[in-house]
Each structure stands twice: as structure tokens, then as C-alpha cells.
Image (cartoon, grey):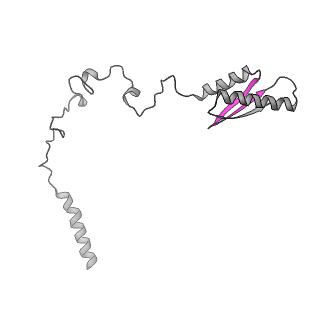
Amino acid sequence: MKKLLMLIVFAVVMVSGCGQDNTESVYDKNEDQAGVGLNRDDDGVREGDGPNFTKDRDNGMTMTDQNPNLLNTDNENHHSYSQDVQKAKDVISDAGYEPGSIWINGGEMNVTAQLEGRVTRKDRENAQKTLQQKLTRALPRYDINVDIQ
């Protein structure tokens, strides 16, 4: 019996929320909160001067200028991994080596370079150490692993 009574009370409470009459609203259906009449024509664009008005609607702005949440991809100063790879190739070539494969994985750059002719192990280690120092100075954002072949 208690369960049935609770179920009936719950049903009455749920149904009573649907019976409200919203005709006595503070705002008219054609007005916004400030009481100004809404312009339902021209997709909300009002006549006049200022933001969101017809005179200032576009003015040559792109979508990235209008929405601050979009990335600015037309900026020349944004970071590119291809620029870093090209910089590494330039450093390797300036050091007198032949650049091999270069790839970036997160904050790590793996570089291969070739030496001309046959070289001893000590010369290869010295070349690897100097090349790693030059690359670290040129590209300090990466942990650079150099492999001399």
C-alpha cells in the first residue's frame, strides 16, 4: 500500500510540472530580454553601423579573423616540422656530411648522415659528437640522436 501511495504521489508531482501556463511571460514573444523588438527578417542582421550590422558585415575578414577559437593557418610564423627537417639537412651539409634520413617523433629527432670513404671508429665517434653538438645548437627544442654511417 505504501508503495502504491508513493507511486501515485510521484506521478502527480511529475504531471503537475507540465500544466504551467506561460502566457503571462515578462517578455513578449517578439522581444528579447531588453524589450527591443527582434528583427526576424534578414537572418538577424540589423540596419545601421556597428558589429553585426549590414554595413560592417564582411569587410574582407576571413573566418579566422572572426572566430578566435580557429587556428590561424595563414600565418607565416607558425611552426612546421618540414622547416626543422630542412634546417637539420642544412646543418649536416654545412658540416661536410651527406644528410641521410631525418625523422621527428615527438620531442626527439633522429638523424642519419654519411661520411665519404672508409673511416675509423674513433673518427666516426668524433664526427657523431660534433654533428650532434651543431644540431643541438641549431635545433634546441629536440633531443637529437645522430647515427653516422
Front residue of 109 and 39 = 109
**Is 141 positioned to the left or the right of 35 in the image?**
right
Q: Residue at x 20, y 30 (%)?
A: 41
113 part of magenta stretch: yes
Q: Residue at x 39, y 32 (%)?
A: 68
**Is 136 positioned to the left or the right of 54 in the image?**
right
The part of the image, by quadrant, that contains residue 123 is: top right
The image shows residue 132 at horizontal and vertical percentages of 73, 31
Q: Residue furthest bottom?
A: 1
Predominant SS of the magenta segment:
strand
Quarter holding the C terminus? top right
71 part of magenta stretch: no
Q: Which region of the structure is painted magenta?
A: 95-119
The image shows residue 111 at horizontal and vertical percentages of 71, 31
Q: Residue at x 13, y 46 (%)?
A: 26
Front residue of 55 and 113 = 113
Front residue of 12 and 119 = 119
The image shows residue 124 at horizontal and vertical percentages of 83, 30
Q: Residue at x 75, y 22 (%)?
A: 95
Front residue of 98 and 44 = 98
The image shows residue 95, relative to residue 23, as above or below, that is above
The part of the image, by quadrant, that contains residue 85 is: top right
The image shows residue 139 at horizontal and vertical percentages of 64, 29
Q: Residue furthest left?
A: 24
The image shows residue 4, relative to residue 135, as above or below, that is below
